[in-house]
Image (spheres, rainbow, N blue to C red):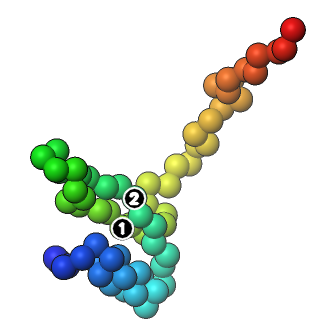
Amino acid sequence: MKFDTLQQGISFYEKYAKVSGFDTRLYSTKKRKSDGKISLKYCVCNKEGFRETPRLHADCKKKKKKDQ
């Protein structure tokens, strides 16, 4: 489906999601290299791309420097 404006597309998908019984979120954006304008915007179900494991592990956190 193609829309005249980005906001029209987002509004359509949000209304569709509400009627269908799920929530949405904005996922990703692609821009044209030539002028930097948005050419594609992904609106997905809020469960799309759900991770079973947490992103950060305790051993991956940066340690703070102590003041001397």
Quick check: 29 left or right of 67? left
> Which of these two is toward me, 34 or 18?
34
Rendered location of residue 22, percent (x, y): 48, 78
In this rendering, is residue 33 above or below 28? above
The image quadrant of residue 45 is: bottom left
- The disc at residue 35 is none
Which comes before the other along the chain, label 1 or label 2?
2
Near mark 1 (Cα within 10 A), the count class, few <14, some 14-19 or many ≥20, is: some
Quick check: 60 left or right of 1? right
Rendered location of residue 11, percent (x, y): 37, 82
Rendered location of residue 34, percent (x, y): 12, 46
Check disc 1 and report the residue beneath it.
Answer: 43
Helix, strand or loop status at disc 2? strand
Which residue is depicted at the point 62% across and 35% down? 56
Q: Quadrant of the C terminus?
A: top right
Rendered location of residue 8, percent (x, y): 29, 81
Q: Is the Cβ of the residue at disc 1 closer than 8 Å to that at disc 2?
A: yes
Check disc 2 and report the residue beneath it.
Answer: 27
Q: Residue furthest left?
A: 34
- The answer, for residue 20, to whether it is visible in the render is no
Q: Residue furthest bottom?
A: 19
- The answer, for residue 55, to whether it is visible in the render is yes
* Disc 1 residue type (three-letter): Cys
